[in-house]
Image: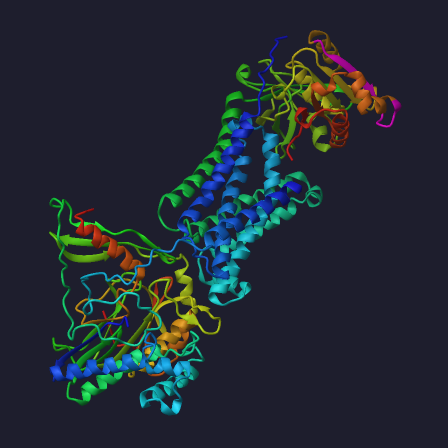
C-alpha cells in the first residue's frame, strides 16, 4: 500500500512483459504487505504460519533479513517495530527480481522504479545511460544529485517529514542526523536494506556507508550537507 | 548575595518553564483522512497514494501506469469571475523541521506547476558536521540540481505537510480564489 | 549666599529603567519562542539545546545591560543615579557569569547528545571545527576570571587601580563573544529583523559607551578647563584645593556630588581619585577638601597653582534632590563632612547636623558650618570623642538620636564618613525607626 511503481522498457518490451512485471508486484504485495491482515508475512508474524509451511520467498526473505541484521550491526532490524516487517528489504528486492526477469526475457534496456528504489539496465529511450535524480529532501519538486548508469541499483531511504521516523533499534528512539540516504550498487534489495540501516544509524551512518565494499552512497544530513562517494557514477 | 541567588533561580525557573511549555504536545497539523490530493503533476508516475511512511517502505502495491508520464494538468470549474492572478498559496503547515507551504501556479484554470515555498530551518553549524564524516566522502552544501532526468529515487509527495497544504490550495483554487 | 534648593527627584526614573530592562529581556527571548515549533523538543538533546539557547539570549542581553549601567551616561545618572546603577551592576554580575557558564554547559550537553559525544569531547570538536567557538570559550573564561577577581576578599587584596584595569577586560569579553553570537546563534545567524535588532543594540551600546566614557568627559574638560587656583591648609592634615576654570557658572553640580580628578602635574598625573566638592556651586570656583592619608594626598598639598585638572563627573546621588521629606538629619563622620557641608547650602531650612570627629583638631570648616547654621537654620551638634567614649556612644544610639531629633523617623537621613562609621550609623538609624527609603549613603566608586 502506498507505493508508486513505474516500469519503463526502452527496448525488447511488450505488454505481456509489463503485465507479468505488475503481476509479480501484486504477488509480492499479497505476500509481504504488513498492512494486510491475511498476507503471509502477517500470518507468520502472528504465529499462524510455521516456517516449514511458509513459501520459498518468505523463507528466503527471512534468511536475507537475518543476514542483513548481522551485516549492519543490528541497524537493519526486521523486528524494529515489534512486529516482523521486512519492507526495508522487500521493496528493493521485489524490484530487483522484476528487473532480473525482464532482463532474462530479453528486455535489456529498462528502468524499474518501486517507491523510489530504482533498478536500471541498459540505455534510456534517448539512447544514453539512464539518469536517476535523487529527491531533494526539502523540496519535493527538485532533485539534489544525479546518478547515471547502465546496470545499477539505486535505493533511497529518507525522512522527509518529522512525522515519519526511522527508529534507532539500539536506543528505541527516532534516529537523528541524516535526512536522506541513497545507496548505489548491484543488488537493489541489499541497497535498500543498507539505506534503511544507515538512516537508523544517524550521523555515523555516513561513516559506515563509506566503508562498504561495492556500494556507493549519497547522504544528506539534517543540516543540509550532502556527502557522496567519490567513485559514484554521478553526473551533474 | 541573596539577590544573586534569587536571580539565578529565576533564570533557571523561567528557562525550564519556557522549554516545558514549548516542548509539550504541540499543535500537530490536521491529518488528512486518506484524502487524495487529486490530479497532481508529479515527476514520477501517476497518482500517488498519501500516507505512505517514508522510512520503512511497505510492500509495494502497483497503483500506477506502465510508463513514466508527463505532468497532467488538473481541471477545475470556476464559478467565480475571471481571476486576476494565477497563483493560489496553500496554508503554511508546520512540522518540527520547519514548515511547508505549497503554491499552485495556474494558467487559466489549469494547474501548470506546484511549488513548495519553504525549506525547514537549518542550523548554523552545518560546517562542523562534516568533521564527523569520513574523509573519503565528498562534502558539499546541498542544492537543487539535475536536469533531463529519467526517474527519481526517493519517495515523492509523501510528506503529509505537503499534502495538507496542497489539498487546501486546490480547494481554494476550485473556489476561484487567487493570490 | 544664593538660596538654591534643587527640586526633588522621585523614583520614576528608576522605575522606568527597570521597566525597560524587563521589556528588553522579553524581547531578547521572544524570537526563540516564536521560531521554535511547539512539540519540537522531543528528546534530551533538543531540550538541552533549547534551554542553552534561551540562557544564551539572556546572557547576551545581560552583558549589554551591564555595560550600559557603567557607561556613565548623564541621562542614566539623572534617571536612577550612579550609586544605584553600580549596585545593580554588582548584583547582576554574578548572575551573568552563571548564565554564561550555564549556556555553555547546556549547549555542550545538547550537541553532545545529538552527536553522540560527551560534553568535553563535544567542546573539543566545536573548538577545532567551528569558527568563532574558540573566541567564545575564551570569552567565557575571561568573564569567569573577572568574576573571581570581583569577590570582595580578592578585590580588597589588590590596589584599586589594578583591579579596575583587570575589570576592564570585560570589554574583551564582549568583543570575543560577539562573533559566535552572530555566526552561530540560532536566532541571530539568519538575516532578518532579529539579527538586525541585536546588531543595532550592540551599535547602540558602543555609542553610549563612547559618549559616556570618552566624548562627554572630553567635552566637559575642554569646556571648563579646570585648573588649580589655590591650595589652603584647613588643619594640619586637611587641605582645601580651589579649582578655577572657564564658564564655571554653567557647570551644573549639586552639593554632595563628586568627580574623579586627575591632577596633571608631575607625579600625580598617572592616578585619578574621587573627591566630593565641599561647597555648592557658585560660578567662581570648585572646592575640594581632602584629608591627607597617604603619599598621593601628601603630594596634593604641593600642587602648584595653574596645574591642569582632568575631571570626570559630576557623579553621585547623595544630594538634596534625593530628599523625600522637608527636613533632614545629616550625620558626618570625620572627613565625611565634606559633601555634607556642600549640601547644607542647598537643603531646605530646618536640617540637623551631627558632626562626629575623634578630636577637636579633626573638625574642619567649622566657621563656615557655624555661619551656615545661622543662615540656613541648621541645628549643629559637634560630637567629639572616640566611638567608645560616653558622649558619642550615647548620641549615636537609637535613643540618643531620637532625643536629639524627635521627629527622626520622618526625616531624610544622610550619612557620610568612613565605611565602618557609615555601617554602624546606618544600623543605629534603622533601629531608631527610619525606613530604608529615607536613608541616603554617600558612596564613592565601588
Q: Which residues are magenta?
A: C377-390
In this rendering, the answer to whether C348 lies above or below B84 is above
Q: Residue at x 40, y 41 (%)?
A: C197
> Picture quarter containing residue A27?
bottom left
In this rendering, the answer to whether A43 lies above or below C236 is below
Tell which of B170 and A114 is nearer to you: B170
Task: Point out the image quarter for the N terminus of chain B.
Answer: top right
On the question of residue C143 being in view, the answer is: no
**Total marks placed:** 0
| For residue B179, side relative to residue A166 (left or right) | left
- Color theme of the render: rainbow
| For residue A130, side relative to residue C88 (left or right) | left
Q: Residue furthest right?
A: C390
| Residue A153 lies in the magenta-colored region | no
Q: Residue at x 16, y 48 (%)?
A: B176
Tell which of C378 and A196 is nearer to you: A196
Q: Residue furthest bottom?
A: A52
Q: Give percent across and percent down for residue C227.
A: 59, 21
Q: Give percent across and percent down for residue C20.
A: 49, 34
| For residue A94, side relative to residue B81 (left or right) | right
> Picture quarter containing residue C423?
top right
In this rendering, the answer to whether B148 lies above or below B100 is below
| For residue C353, side relative to residue A142 (left or right) | right
Q: Give percent across and percent down for residue B89.
A: 23, 50
| Residue C384 lies in the magenta-colored region | yes
Q: Residue at x 16, y 82 (%)?
A: A19
In this rendering, the answer to whether C399 lies above or below B131 is above
Amino acid at each position: 500500500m502506498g507505493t508508486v511503481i513505474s516500469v519503463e522498457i526502452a527496448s525488447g518490451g511488450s505488454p505481456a512483459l509489463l503485465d507479468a512485471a505488475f503481476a509479480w508486484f501484486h504477488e509480492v504485495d499479497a505476500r509481504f504487505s504488513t498492512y494486510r491482515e491475511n498476507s503471509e508475512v502477517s500470518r507468520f508474524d502472528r504465529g499462524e504460519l510455521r516456517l516449514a509451511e511458509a513459501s520459498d520467498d518468505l523463507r528466503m526473505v527471512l534468511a536475507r533479513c537475518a543476514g542483513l541484521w548481522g551485516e549492519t550491526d543490528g541497524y537493519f532490524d526486521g523486528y524494529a517495530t515489534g512486529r516482523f516487517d521486512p519492507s526495508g528489504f522487500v521493496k528493493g528486492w521485489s524490484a530487483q527480481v522484476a528487473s532480473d526477469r525482464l532482463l532474462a526475457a530479453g528486455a535489456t534496456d529498462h528502468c524499474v522504479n518501486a517507491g523510489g528504489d530504482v533498478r536500471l539496465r541498459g540505455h534510456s529511450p534517448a539512447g544514453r545511460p539512464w539518469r536517476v535524480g535523487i529527491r531533494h529532501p526539502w523540496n519535493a519538486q527538485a532533485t539534489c544529485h544525479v546518478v547515471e548508469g547502465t546496470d545499477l541499483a539505486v535505493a533511497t531511504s529518507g525522512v522527509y517529514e518529522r512525522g515519519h521516523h526511522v527508529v534507532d533499534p539500539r536506543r528505541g528512539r527516532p534516529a537523528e542526523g541524516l535526512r536522506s540516504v541513497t545507496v548505489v550498487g548491484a543488488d537493489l534489495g541489499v541497497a535498500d536494506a543498507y539505506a534503511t540501516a544507515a538512516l537508523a544509524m544517524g550521523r555515523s551512518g555516513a561513516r559506515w556507508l563509506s566503508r562498504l565494499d561495492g556500494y556507493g552512497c549519497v547522504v544528506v544530513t539534517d543540516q543540509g550537507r550532502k556527502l557522496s562517494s567519490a567513485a559514484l557514477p554521478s553526473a551533474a | 548575595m541573596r539577590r544573586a541567588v534569587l536571580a539565578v533561580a529565576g533564570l533557571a525557573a523561567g528557562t525550564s518553564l519556557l522549554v516545558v511549555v514549548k516542548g509539550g504536545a504541540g499543535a500537530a497539523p490536521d491529518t488528512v483522512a486518506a484524502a487524495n490530493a487529486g490530479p497532481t503533476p508529479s515527476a514520477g508516475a501517476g497518482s500517488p497514494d498519501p500516507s505512505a511512511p517514508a522510512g520503512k517502505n511497505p510492500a509495494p502495491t502497483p497503483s500506477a501506469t506502465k510508463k513514466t508520464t508527463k505532468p497532467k494538468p488538473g481541471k477545475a470549474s470556476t464559478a467565480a469571475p475571471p481571476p486576476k492572478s494565477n497563483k493560489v498559496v496553500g496554508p503554511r503547515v508546520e512540522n518540527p523541521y520547519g514548515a511547508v507551504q505549497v503554491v499552485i501556479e495556474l494558467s487559466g484554470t489549469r494547474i501548470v506547476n506546484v511549488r513548495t515555498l519553504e525549506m525547514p530551518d537549518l542550523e548554523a553549524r552545518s560546517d562542523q558536521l562534516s568533521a564527523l564524516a569520513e574523509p573519503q566522502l565528498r562534502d558539499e552544501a546541498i542544492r537543487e540540481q539535475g536536469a533531463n532526468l529519467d526517474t527519481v529515487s526517493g519517495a515523492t509527495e509523501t510528506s503529509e505537510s505537503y499534502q495538507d497544504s496542497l489539498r487546501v490550495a486546490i480547494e481554494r483554487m476550485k473556489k476561484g480564489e487567487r493570490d | 549666599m544664593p538660596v538654591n534648593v534643587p527640586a526633588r527627584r522621585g523614583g520614576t526614573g528608576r522605575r522606568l529603567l527597570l521597566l525597560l530592562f524587563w521589556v528588553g529581556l522579553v524581547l531578547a527571548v521572544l524570537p526563540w519562542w516564536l521560531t521554535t515549533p511547539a512539540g519540537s523538543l522531543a528528546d534530551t538533546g533538543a531540550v538541552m539545546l533549547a534551554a542553552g539557547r534561551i540562557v544564551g539570549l539572556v546572557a547576551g542581553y545581560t552583558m549589554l545591560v551591564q555595560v550600559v549601567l557603567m557607561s556613565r551616561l548623564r541621562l542614566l545618572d539623572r534617571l536612577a543615579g550612579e550609586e544605584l546603577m553600580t549596585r545593580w551592576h554588582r548584583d547582576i554580575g554574578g548572575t551573568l557569569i552563571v548564565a554564561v557558564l550555564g549556556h555553555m554547559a547546556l549547549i555542550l550537553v545538547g550537541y553532545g547528545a545529538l552527536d553522540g559525544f560527551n560534553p568535553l569531547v563535544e567542546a573539543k570538536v566545536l573548538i577545532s571545527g567551528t569558527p568563532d567557538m574558540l573566541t567564545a570559550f575564551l570569552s567565557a573564561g575571561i568573564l569567569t576570571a573577572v568574576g573571581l577577581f570581583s569577590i570582595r576578599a580578592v578585590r580588597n587584596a589588590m590596589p584599586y587601580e589594578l583591579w579596575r584595569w583587570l575589570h576592564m577586560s570585560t570589554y574583551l569579553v564582549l568583543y570575543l563573544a560577539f562573533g559566535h553570537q552572530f555566526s552561530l546563534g540560532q536566532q541571530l545567524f539568519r538575516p532578518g529583523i532579529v539579527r538586525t535588532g541585536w546588531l543595532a543594540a550592540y551599535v547602540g551600546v558602543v555609542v553610549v559607551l563612547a559618549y559616556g566614557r570618552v566624548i562627554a568627559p572630553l567635552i566637559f574638560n575642554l569646556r571648563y578647563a579646570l585648573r588649580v587656583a589655590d591650595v589652603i591648609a584647613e588643619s594640619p592634615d586637611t587641605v582645601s584645593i580651589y579649582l578655577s576654570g572657564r564658564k564655571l557658572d554653567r557647570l551644573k553640580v549639586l552639593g554632595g556630588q563628586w568627580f574623579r580628578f586627575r591632577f596633571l602635574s608631575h607625579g600625580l598625573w598617572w592616578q585619578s581619585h574621587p573627591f566630593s566638592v565641599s561647597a555648592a556651586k557658585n560660578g567662581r570656583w570648585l572646592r575640594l577638601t581632602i584629608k591627607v592619608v597617604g603619599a598621593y594626598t601628601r603630594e596634593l598639598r604641593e600642587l602648584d597653582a595653574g596645574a591642569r585638572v582632568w575631571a570626570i563627573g559630576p557623579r553621585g546621588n547623595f544630594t538634596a534632590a534625593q530628599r523625600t521629606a522637608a527636613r533632614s538629619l545629616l550625620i558626618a563622620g570625620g572627613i565625611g563632612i565634606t559633601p555634607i557641608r556642600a549640601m547644607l547650602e542647598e537643603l531646605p531650612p530646618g536640617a540637623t547636623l551631627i558632626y562626629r570627629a575623634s578630636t577637636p583638631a579633626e573638625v574642619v570648616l567649622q566657621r563656615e558650618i557655624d555661619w551656615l547654621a545661622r543662615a540656613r537654620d541648621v541645628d549643629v551638634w559637634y560630637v567629639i570623642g572616640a566611638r567608645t567614649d560616653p558622649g558619642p556612644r550615647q548620641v549615636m544610639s537609637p535613643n540618643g538620636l531620637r532625643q536629639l531629633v524627635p521627629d527622626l523617623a520622618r526625616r531624610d537621613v544622610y550619612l557620610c564618613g568612613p565605611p565602618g562609621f557609615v555601617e554602624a550609623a546606618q544600623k543605629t538609624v534603622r533601629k531608631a525607626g527610619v525606613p530604608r527609603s529615607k536613608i541616603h549613603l554617600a558612596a564613592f566608586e565601588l
